[in-house]
Image (cartoon, helix red, strand yellow):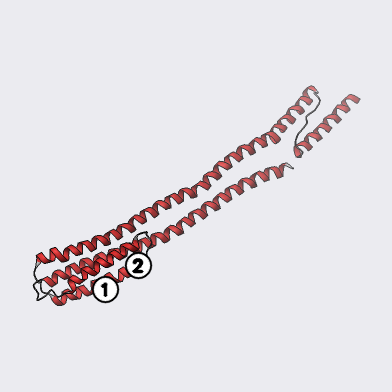
Amino acid sequence: MGMRIKILSGFIILSLMLAIAGIWTIYEIKSAGFSVQALLDENYRSINAADDMIEALEREDSAILLLLLGKWDEGRRVLRQADSLFNERLKFAYTNITVPGEQSRLDTISAMYNQYKKLWQRPIVNTPHEGNIEWYFSSIHTRFLTVKASVQELNNMNRNAMYQTASKLKQRSDQAVMPGLIAIISALLFSIIFTFFVNHYMINPIIKITDRVERFISKKTPYDIQIESHDEIANLSESISHLCAYVQGQENSR
């Protein structure tokens, strides 16, 4: 095998190692990015739905206070809007379940909300409940806090899931770095081995040839180098050997 092919082969192998590692790293990073982005989007939508449900509950609580003050029309209008928002976001949450245990949590919220709704669906204005703050705190407000806490728990579930997803992204990014590290280490080892063979089969023979030529010129020492490889250096050494033999023969014939 010629020197040109040997050197070219070494650089081709090194380039292939780096190219494979680069492609592998890019694939891992893109794959991690797509999968994690989908999970984060789903968790974010669930968190938004829970936030909207909490907002709806707080508006209902304010509307009930309006009813306690005898403001029937305004209180009922706010209740209808808030109830519509809560049910809409609850329905959406059922279609966007991504966390284990989220289904049962939604069922609990739905059941608690229905119980809470029954309390304020009954007439309040022009009844003994109107202006009755003790009844509000002991009955409705307590139920409101229970439903709100359950929705907040749903919110926390999805926030924790987002944190875990971010942690998985870090792990995937660490895994994506591994091919690059392996490529660097492999390239370093290959470079050391390649340098050894270059020195052994190219640099050292050239040094020996140069030394023997100089000794032949200065001391007439016979040129007797044997090159192990079968390449251009071996051909060069053989040509120099023939040249030295020719020169020595010419000098002996004088």
Which label sits on residue 209? none
- Residue found 48% across the figure and 49% down from its top: 175
Reading the image, the residue beneath label 1 is 84
- On the question of residue 171 being in view, the answer is yes
Which one is nearer the viewer's eye here, 86 or 225? Answer: 86
Q: Where is residue 242 in the image (x, y as percent from the top left)?
A: 84, 33
Residue assigned mark 2:
94
Residue found 27% across the figure and 60% down from its top: 152
Q: Nearer the viewer, residue 31 or 146?
A: 146
- Residue extending farthest top: 219
Residue furthest right in the image: 253
**Picture coordinates of residue 186 (x, y %)?**
58, 42
For the C terminus, the image quarter is top right
Q: In this view, does 132 lie above or below 15?
A: below
- Describe residue 183's horizontal placement relative to residue 210 as left or right: left
In the figure, residue 246 lies in which quadrant? Answer: top right
Q: Which residue is drawn at 58% across and 51% down?
A: 20
Residue 124 falls in image quadrant? bottom left
Position of residue 112 measured from the top left corner of the image (x, y, whole percent):
24, 66
Amino acid under disc 2:
Tyr
Q: In which quarter of the image is residue 132?
A: bottom left
Q: Residue at x 24, y 67 (%)?
A: 113
Q: Looking at the rendering, in which quadrant would you find the N terminus? A: top right
In the image, residue 208 sits, relative to residue 22, either above or below, namely above
Which residue type carries mark 1? Answer: Ser
Q: Which element carries disc 1, helix, strand or loop?
A: helix
Q: How crowded is mark 1: few (under 14 residues within 10 Å), some or many (20 or more)?
A: few
Question: Depth check: 42 or 177 in front?
Answer: 42
The x and y percentages for residue 26 are 51, 54
Q: Name the N-terminal-most of marks 2 and 1.
A: 1
Q: Is residue 216 left or right of residue 88?
A: right
* Position of residue 213 in the picture relative to residue 135 (left or right): right
